[in-house]
């Protein structure tokens, strides 16, 4: 039973067996209940969003919704101010592993109904959206018009608000950086209830706030709308798979492709210590006559990471044409590779043909129904981490991951990090190619101790000027945290916009103590 935890934990054999049973057979509950509920939830949202977009009622309603938020914040401001504020978005809806503890002791401001796309301006090449608009909603609306966001983080339910106040990365990061770098302006309700417009434009009065908002997790104000760049796109991508059978070949290829201007998208999946696949893609108008079309998003298709593994085994460099939306949401159906634990036989051909159309279960509904025992088992042996480190350090970083957790596959996503102000900054004065190393899975190492192991990895990441994505568990102390992140602009903005009484410090929202 060593695999389920650490020697120091005192938990009876019976409890372990029960946990194991609940974990292994979670599908008994997920298939008949969560899958239909997910389908119903998505269908309702699809119809509702389509209707609202058609009747164009969102822009008018927006002003009313924002006025309500301002009123609530002003009420807080003129009250006793004993409690701090956060959004009322419930913990089970967020796309992170933990349920936030801090919400119950705070005044929750209702930003929940900010769920609409407000304006698509194809001349200015921007889209103005409310913060709870999801990536799935945006691709569904923009792609038929011939446009897309330059960066589309791949899980359908990720929100614009989460991508901006937290962080968003995707395979076009090699060209565009992170989600915050494709934003033009933010509309913010401040701690005083004032509505301000913070733009990237250097003549904008609130330009520093524009740079301060990303990664601040709602601790500088409430985001009520964002204007984001859009670019023209084509209906397909031409995806090339480069199987790599040694680690050197894998990282050389990753670095070569990440620095090559022709590539719109570059990502890697490392399947073992010394083998993996690098994939590059660019937009294309049509599938050539002899080209192979693969609509990977269709319900009966194999999970994307399994499909890639099959090509890796064949060892052949392969080219496929993939519908653009299928490409963007390629990791949604299998929630990267997390679905294996939830429905172990989900990639079986019979399951796919009969029930594939009901997949995937919604992460939010899974979270809502996660029992304490399942949470314990995930706490003890499941690792979810994304570390952004300079691409030049990839070999060393993977060695540390291998030594500490030895979990594969690893997600490798290059991103171009600008030298701009904000919580995440590198001070080179030029762009540096980073890579996001994503580790998602069960650790079977006997030496794995969630806190100690994560702290070792965090220490390494700090030592190479890397950063940890904060949706994951962080075990850093405040001083370690502020060694990793730059507090100069953040602290100044917290004073300037009277945030200290109104919102907690970002560390107090993301540290382990703030989460279940
Ligand atoms: C005590 C104190 C007072 C401050 N007062 C102000 C103030 O009056 N006005 C103000 O705007 N900020 C102010 N700030 C915030 C300051 O801009 C940030 O701390 C900034 O991120 C620090 O950058 P740096 O000095 O390391 O700049 P550098 O590393 O030298 O800057 C890197 C690049 O970012 C650009 N840059 C730097 N700051 C900003 C910014 N705020 N917005 C856009 N581009 C920027 C620079 O031009 C340069 O190209 C103050 C901070 C402190 C601690
Ligand atoms: N490809 C990728 O990049 C992926 C990224 N992720 C991570 O998941 C998270 C996104 O999850 P998602 O469910 O969309 O977002 P969350 O609800 O988790 O929000 C993330 C943070 O942003 C704050 N926030 C959200 N909306 C607002 C707003 N309107 N005004 C002020 N603050 C706000 C929240 O504050 P509060 O606590 O007050 O609600 C919270 O601290 C991100 O942090 C991201 O890093 C996950 C998967 C993939
Ligand atoms: C930067 C990138 C690409 C990050 C991808 C992160 C995903 C793999 C994470 C985000 C949220 C996440 C932690 C989650 C889970 C798996 C991994 C996810 C989807 C699951 C579904 C695993 C099963 C759990 O019981 C529970 C339902 C609580 C969580 C919910 C969040």
Image (cartoon, rainbow, N blue to C red):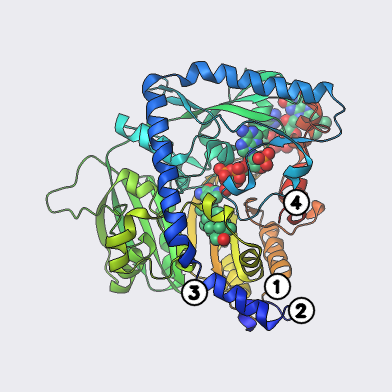
Of the two numbered discs 1 and 3 on the same chain, state the one appearing first in sequence.
3
Q: In this view, does 436 lie to the left or right of 123?
A: right
Give the x, y percent position of residue 167. Answer: 58, 44
Give the x, y percent position of residue 158. Answer: 51, 44
Q: Secondary structure beneath disc 2?
A: loop
Q: Mark 4 points at which residue?
A: 514
Q: Name the residue under label 2.
A: 8
Q: Which of 94 and 119 is in front in this view?
A: 94
Q: Mark 1 points at which residue?
A: 449
User: Marks 1 and 3: CB-CB under 8 Å?
Assistant: no
Q: How crowded is the residue under tag 4: few (<14 C-alpha within 10 Å), some, or many (20+)?
A: some
User: Marks 2 and 1: CB-CB under 8 Å?
Assistant: yes
Of the two numbered discs 4 and 3 on the same chain, state the one appearing first in sequence.
3
User: Marks 1 and 4: CB-CB under 8 Å?
Assistant: no
Q: How crowded is the residue under tag 1: few (<14 C-alpha within 10 Å), some, or many (20+)?
A: some
Quarter location, residue 103: top right
Q: Name the residue under label 3.
A: 273
Which mark is nearer the camera, 2 or 3?
A: 2
* Vertical position of residue 513 compared to residue 181: above or below: below
Q: Can residue 335 be seen in this view?
A: no
Q: How crowded is the residue under tag 2: few (<14 C-alpha within 10 Å), some, or many (20+)?
A: few
Q: Secondary structure beneath disc 4?
A: helix
């Amino acid at each position: 039973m060593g695999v389920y935890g650490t020697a120091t934990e005192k938990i009876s054999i019976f409890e372990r067996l029960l946990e194991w049973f609940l974990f292994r057979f979670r599908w008994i509950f997920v298939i008949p209940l969560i899958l239909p509920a997910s389908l119903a939830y998505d269908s309702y949202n699809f119809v509702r969003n389509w209707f609202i977009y058609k009747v164009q009622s969102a822009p008018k309603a927006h002003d009313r919704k924002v006025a309500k938020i301002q009123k609530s914040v002003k009420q807080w401001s003129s009250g006793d101010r004993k409690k701090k504020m956060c959004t009322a978005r419930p913990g089970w809806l967020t796309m992170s592993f933990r349920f936030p503890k801090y919400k119950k002791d705070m005044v929750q401001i209702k930003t929940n109904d900010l769920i609409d796309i407000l304006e698509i301006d194809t001349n200015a090449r921007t889209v103005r959206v409310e913060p709870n608009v999801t990536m799935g909603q945006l691709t569904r609306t923009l792609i038929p018009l011939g446009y897309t966001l330059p960066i589309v983080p791949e899980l359908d339910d990720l929100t614009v608000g989460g991508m901006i106040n937290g962080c968003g990365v995707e395979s076009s990061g090699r060209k565009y950086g992170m989600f915050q770098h494709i934003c033009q302006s933010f509309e913010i309700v401040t701690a005083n209830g004032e509505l301000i417009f913070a733009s990237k434009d250097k003549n904008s009065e609130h330009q520093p706030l524009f740079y301060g908002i990303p990664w601040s997790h709602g601790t500088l104000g409430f985001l009520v709308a964002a204007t984001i760049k859009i670019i023209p796109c084509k209906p397909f991508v031409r995806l090339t798979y480069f199987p790599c059978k040694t680690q050197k070949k894998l990282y050389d290829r990753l670095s070569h492709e990440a620095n090559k201007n022709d590539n719109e998208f570059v990502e890697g999946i490392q399947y073992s210590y010394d083998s993996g696949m690098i994939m590059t893609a660019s937009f294309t108008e049509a599938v050539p006559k002899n080209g192979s079309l693969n609509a990977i998003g269709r319900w009966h298709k194999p999970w994307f990471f399994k499909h890639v593994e099959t090509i890796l085994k064949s060892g052949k460099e392969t080219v496929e044409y993939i519908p653009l939306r299928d490409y963007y949401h390629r990791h949604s159906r299998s929630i990267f590779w997390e679905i294996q634990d939830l429905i172990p036989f989900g990639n079986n051909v019979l399951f796919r043909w009969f029930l594939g159309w009901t997949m995937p279960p919604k992460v939010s509904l899974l979270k809502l129904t996660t029992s304490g025992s399942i949470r314990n088992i995930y706490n003890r042996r499941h690792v979810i981490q994304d570390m952004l480190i300079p691409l030049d350090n990839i070999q060393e970083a993977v060695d540390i991951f291998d030594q500490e957790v030895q979990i594969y596959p690893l997600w490798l996503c290059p991103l171009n990090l600008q030298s701009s102000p904000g919580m995440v900054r590198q001070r080179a004065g030029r762009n540096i190619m980073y890579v996001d190393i994503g580790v998602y899975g069960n650790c079977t190492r006997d030496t794995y101790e969630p806190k100690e192991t994560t702290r070792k990895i965090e220490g390494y990441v700090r030592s190479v000027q890397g950063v940890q994505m904060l949706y994951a568990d962080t075990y850093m102390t405040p001083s370690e945290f502020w060694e990793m992140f730059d507090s100069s602009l953040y602290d100044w903005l917290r004073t300037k916009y009277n945030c200290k009484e109104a919102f907690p410090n970002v560390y107090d929202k993301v540290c382990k103590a703030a989460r279940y």
